[in-house]
Image (spheres, helix red, strand yellow):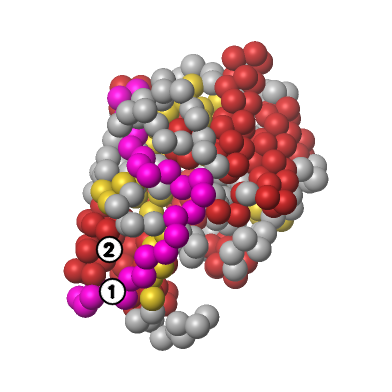
Amino acid sequence: MHIVITGVAGFVGSAIARRMLAEGHSVVGIDSLTSYYDPKIKLANLGDLKSSKFEFIEGDINYIDLADALDGAEIIFHEAGQPGVRKSWGEEFSEYTNANILATQKLLEVARSISTLRKFVYASSSSLYGDAEGYPTSVEALPAPISPYGVSKLAAEHLCTLYGKNFGVPTVSLRYFTVFGPGQRPDMAFTRFMRAAILDDEIQIFGTGEQIRDFTYIDDVVQANYLAATTDTVPGVVYNVAGGSSISVNDVLKIVAEIHGSPLNVRYTTPVAGDVFQTGGDITSIRRDLNWSSQVDVKEGLKRHYAWALKTFAGQSASL
C-alpha cells in the first residue's frame, strides 16, 4: 500500500512508519520539525526510517503542496499536531488553531478528491473529554474539554466526522489515552520521571499525584492504527484507544522507583490549569469493530520504557 503519515518524525508517527515499512509498504512522511521539543530527537526518529520505500517531506501542512504530497495515497495517518495542555493558553493558542484545526481541514479537503484513498486515520485525544461524568468514559459521552488544547483536538475530530458523513471521506478518529513507551516525547511524564531517576535529578509533579490516568503502550496504539486503517468502518467513526490502567501518578512513581532500584526525588507543585483529574476509556466499540484491546500493561510497559531511557539518558548531565 501507499501510505502517507503526517507528523512522521514524532513519537507515534515514527512508530507507525516503522511498522508500515517493516510490512513492505511505501511511506511518504510529512513533518515540519517544530521546536516544541528538541528537533534532534525527531531527526533521530527519521534516521530509523531509512528505506528505499520511505520519502520524507519537510514542511508545514498548511503551506506545502498537499495535492502532490498525497497523490496516490491509500492510507493517511494524520499524526501531526501541536501537543501540550500547558502551553495552549494565551497567545500561543494560534499555534494550536493552525497546527490542529486548519491543517486538518486542509488535509481533509485534499482527501476528498483522492480516488485511491481507503482510510484517513486521525490521532484524536482523550483530552477532549475534560472531567468526564463517568469512568470508563464511552465514546458516546458528551465531550467537554477544559483546556484550549482539548478544544483544538475536538474541533479537528469534528471536522473528520463531518467530512466522513458529508463527503464519504473514510475517516476514523482514535482518541488516544496517554501514550507511553520507548521513544516517548521528553516533555511527557514517564520520560521525565525516568530521566530524572537515572540522572538523580528532581521529579516535579503538578498537583498531588493522586490524579488518575489511563496509560496506553505505544505498540498497542500502533496496532489500533493498523486495524483502523485495514478494517471496514463507517466514515466518521470514533474510537477510544485506552490501555485500561486507571492508575494514579503516585502509583506510577512507586513502580518506577521499584524498577530503578532506589527512591525517587519527588517535589509536588501547583496543579496546571486544564489538567483533568482522571481519565479512563471504555473500549467496547473498538473491541467489537476492530477486535482491538491493549496487550501490554503498565508495569511491563514501564519496564520496557525504563530500559530505553537507561540507554538514552545514562551519562548525560541532569542540567541538560
Magenta residue check for 282: yes
**Which image quarter is the N terminus in?**
top right
Q: Which residues are magenta?
A: 260-285
Q: Which mark is residue 253?
A: 2
Q: Secondary structure at mark 2?
A: helix
Residue 180 occupies which quadrant of the picture? Answer: bottom left
Amino acid type at circle 2 is: Leu
For residue 225, what is the image quadrant? Answer: top left
Of the two numbered discs 2 and 1 on the same chain, state the one appearing first in sequence: 2
Q: Mainly helix, strand or loop, the magenta region?
A: loop
Residue 15, horizontal then vertical, whole percent: 46, 52
Seen in the picture, residue 236 relative to 313 is either above or below; the reply is above
Q: Position of residue 98 (x, y in %)?
A: 72, 43
Categorize mark 1 by other alpha carbons within 10 Å: few (<14), some (14-19), many (20+): many
Q: Do callouts 2 and 1 mark residues in contact (Cβ within 8 Å)?
A: yes
Residue type, numbered disc 1:
Leu
165, above or below 10, in the image: above
From mark 2 to mark 1, how far is it between C-alphas? 8 Å
Residue name at image x 41 percent, y 20 percent: 140
Q: Is residue 85 magenta?
A: no
Q: Is residue 284 shown left or right of residue 108?
A: left
Which residue is at the far top? 166
Where's residue 248, x and y in %?
28, 51
At a point 58% along the width and 57% down the height, the residue shown is: 9
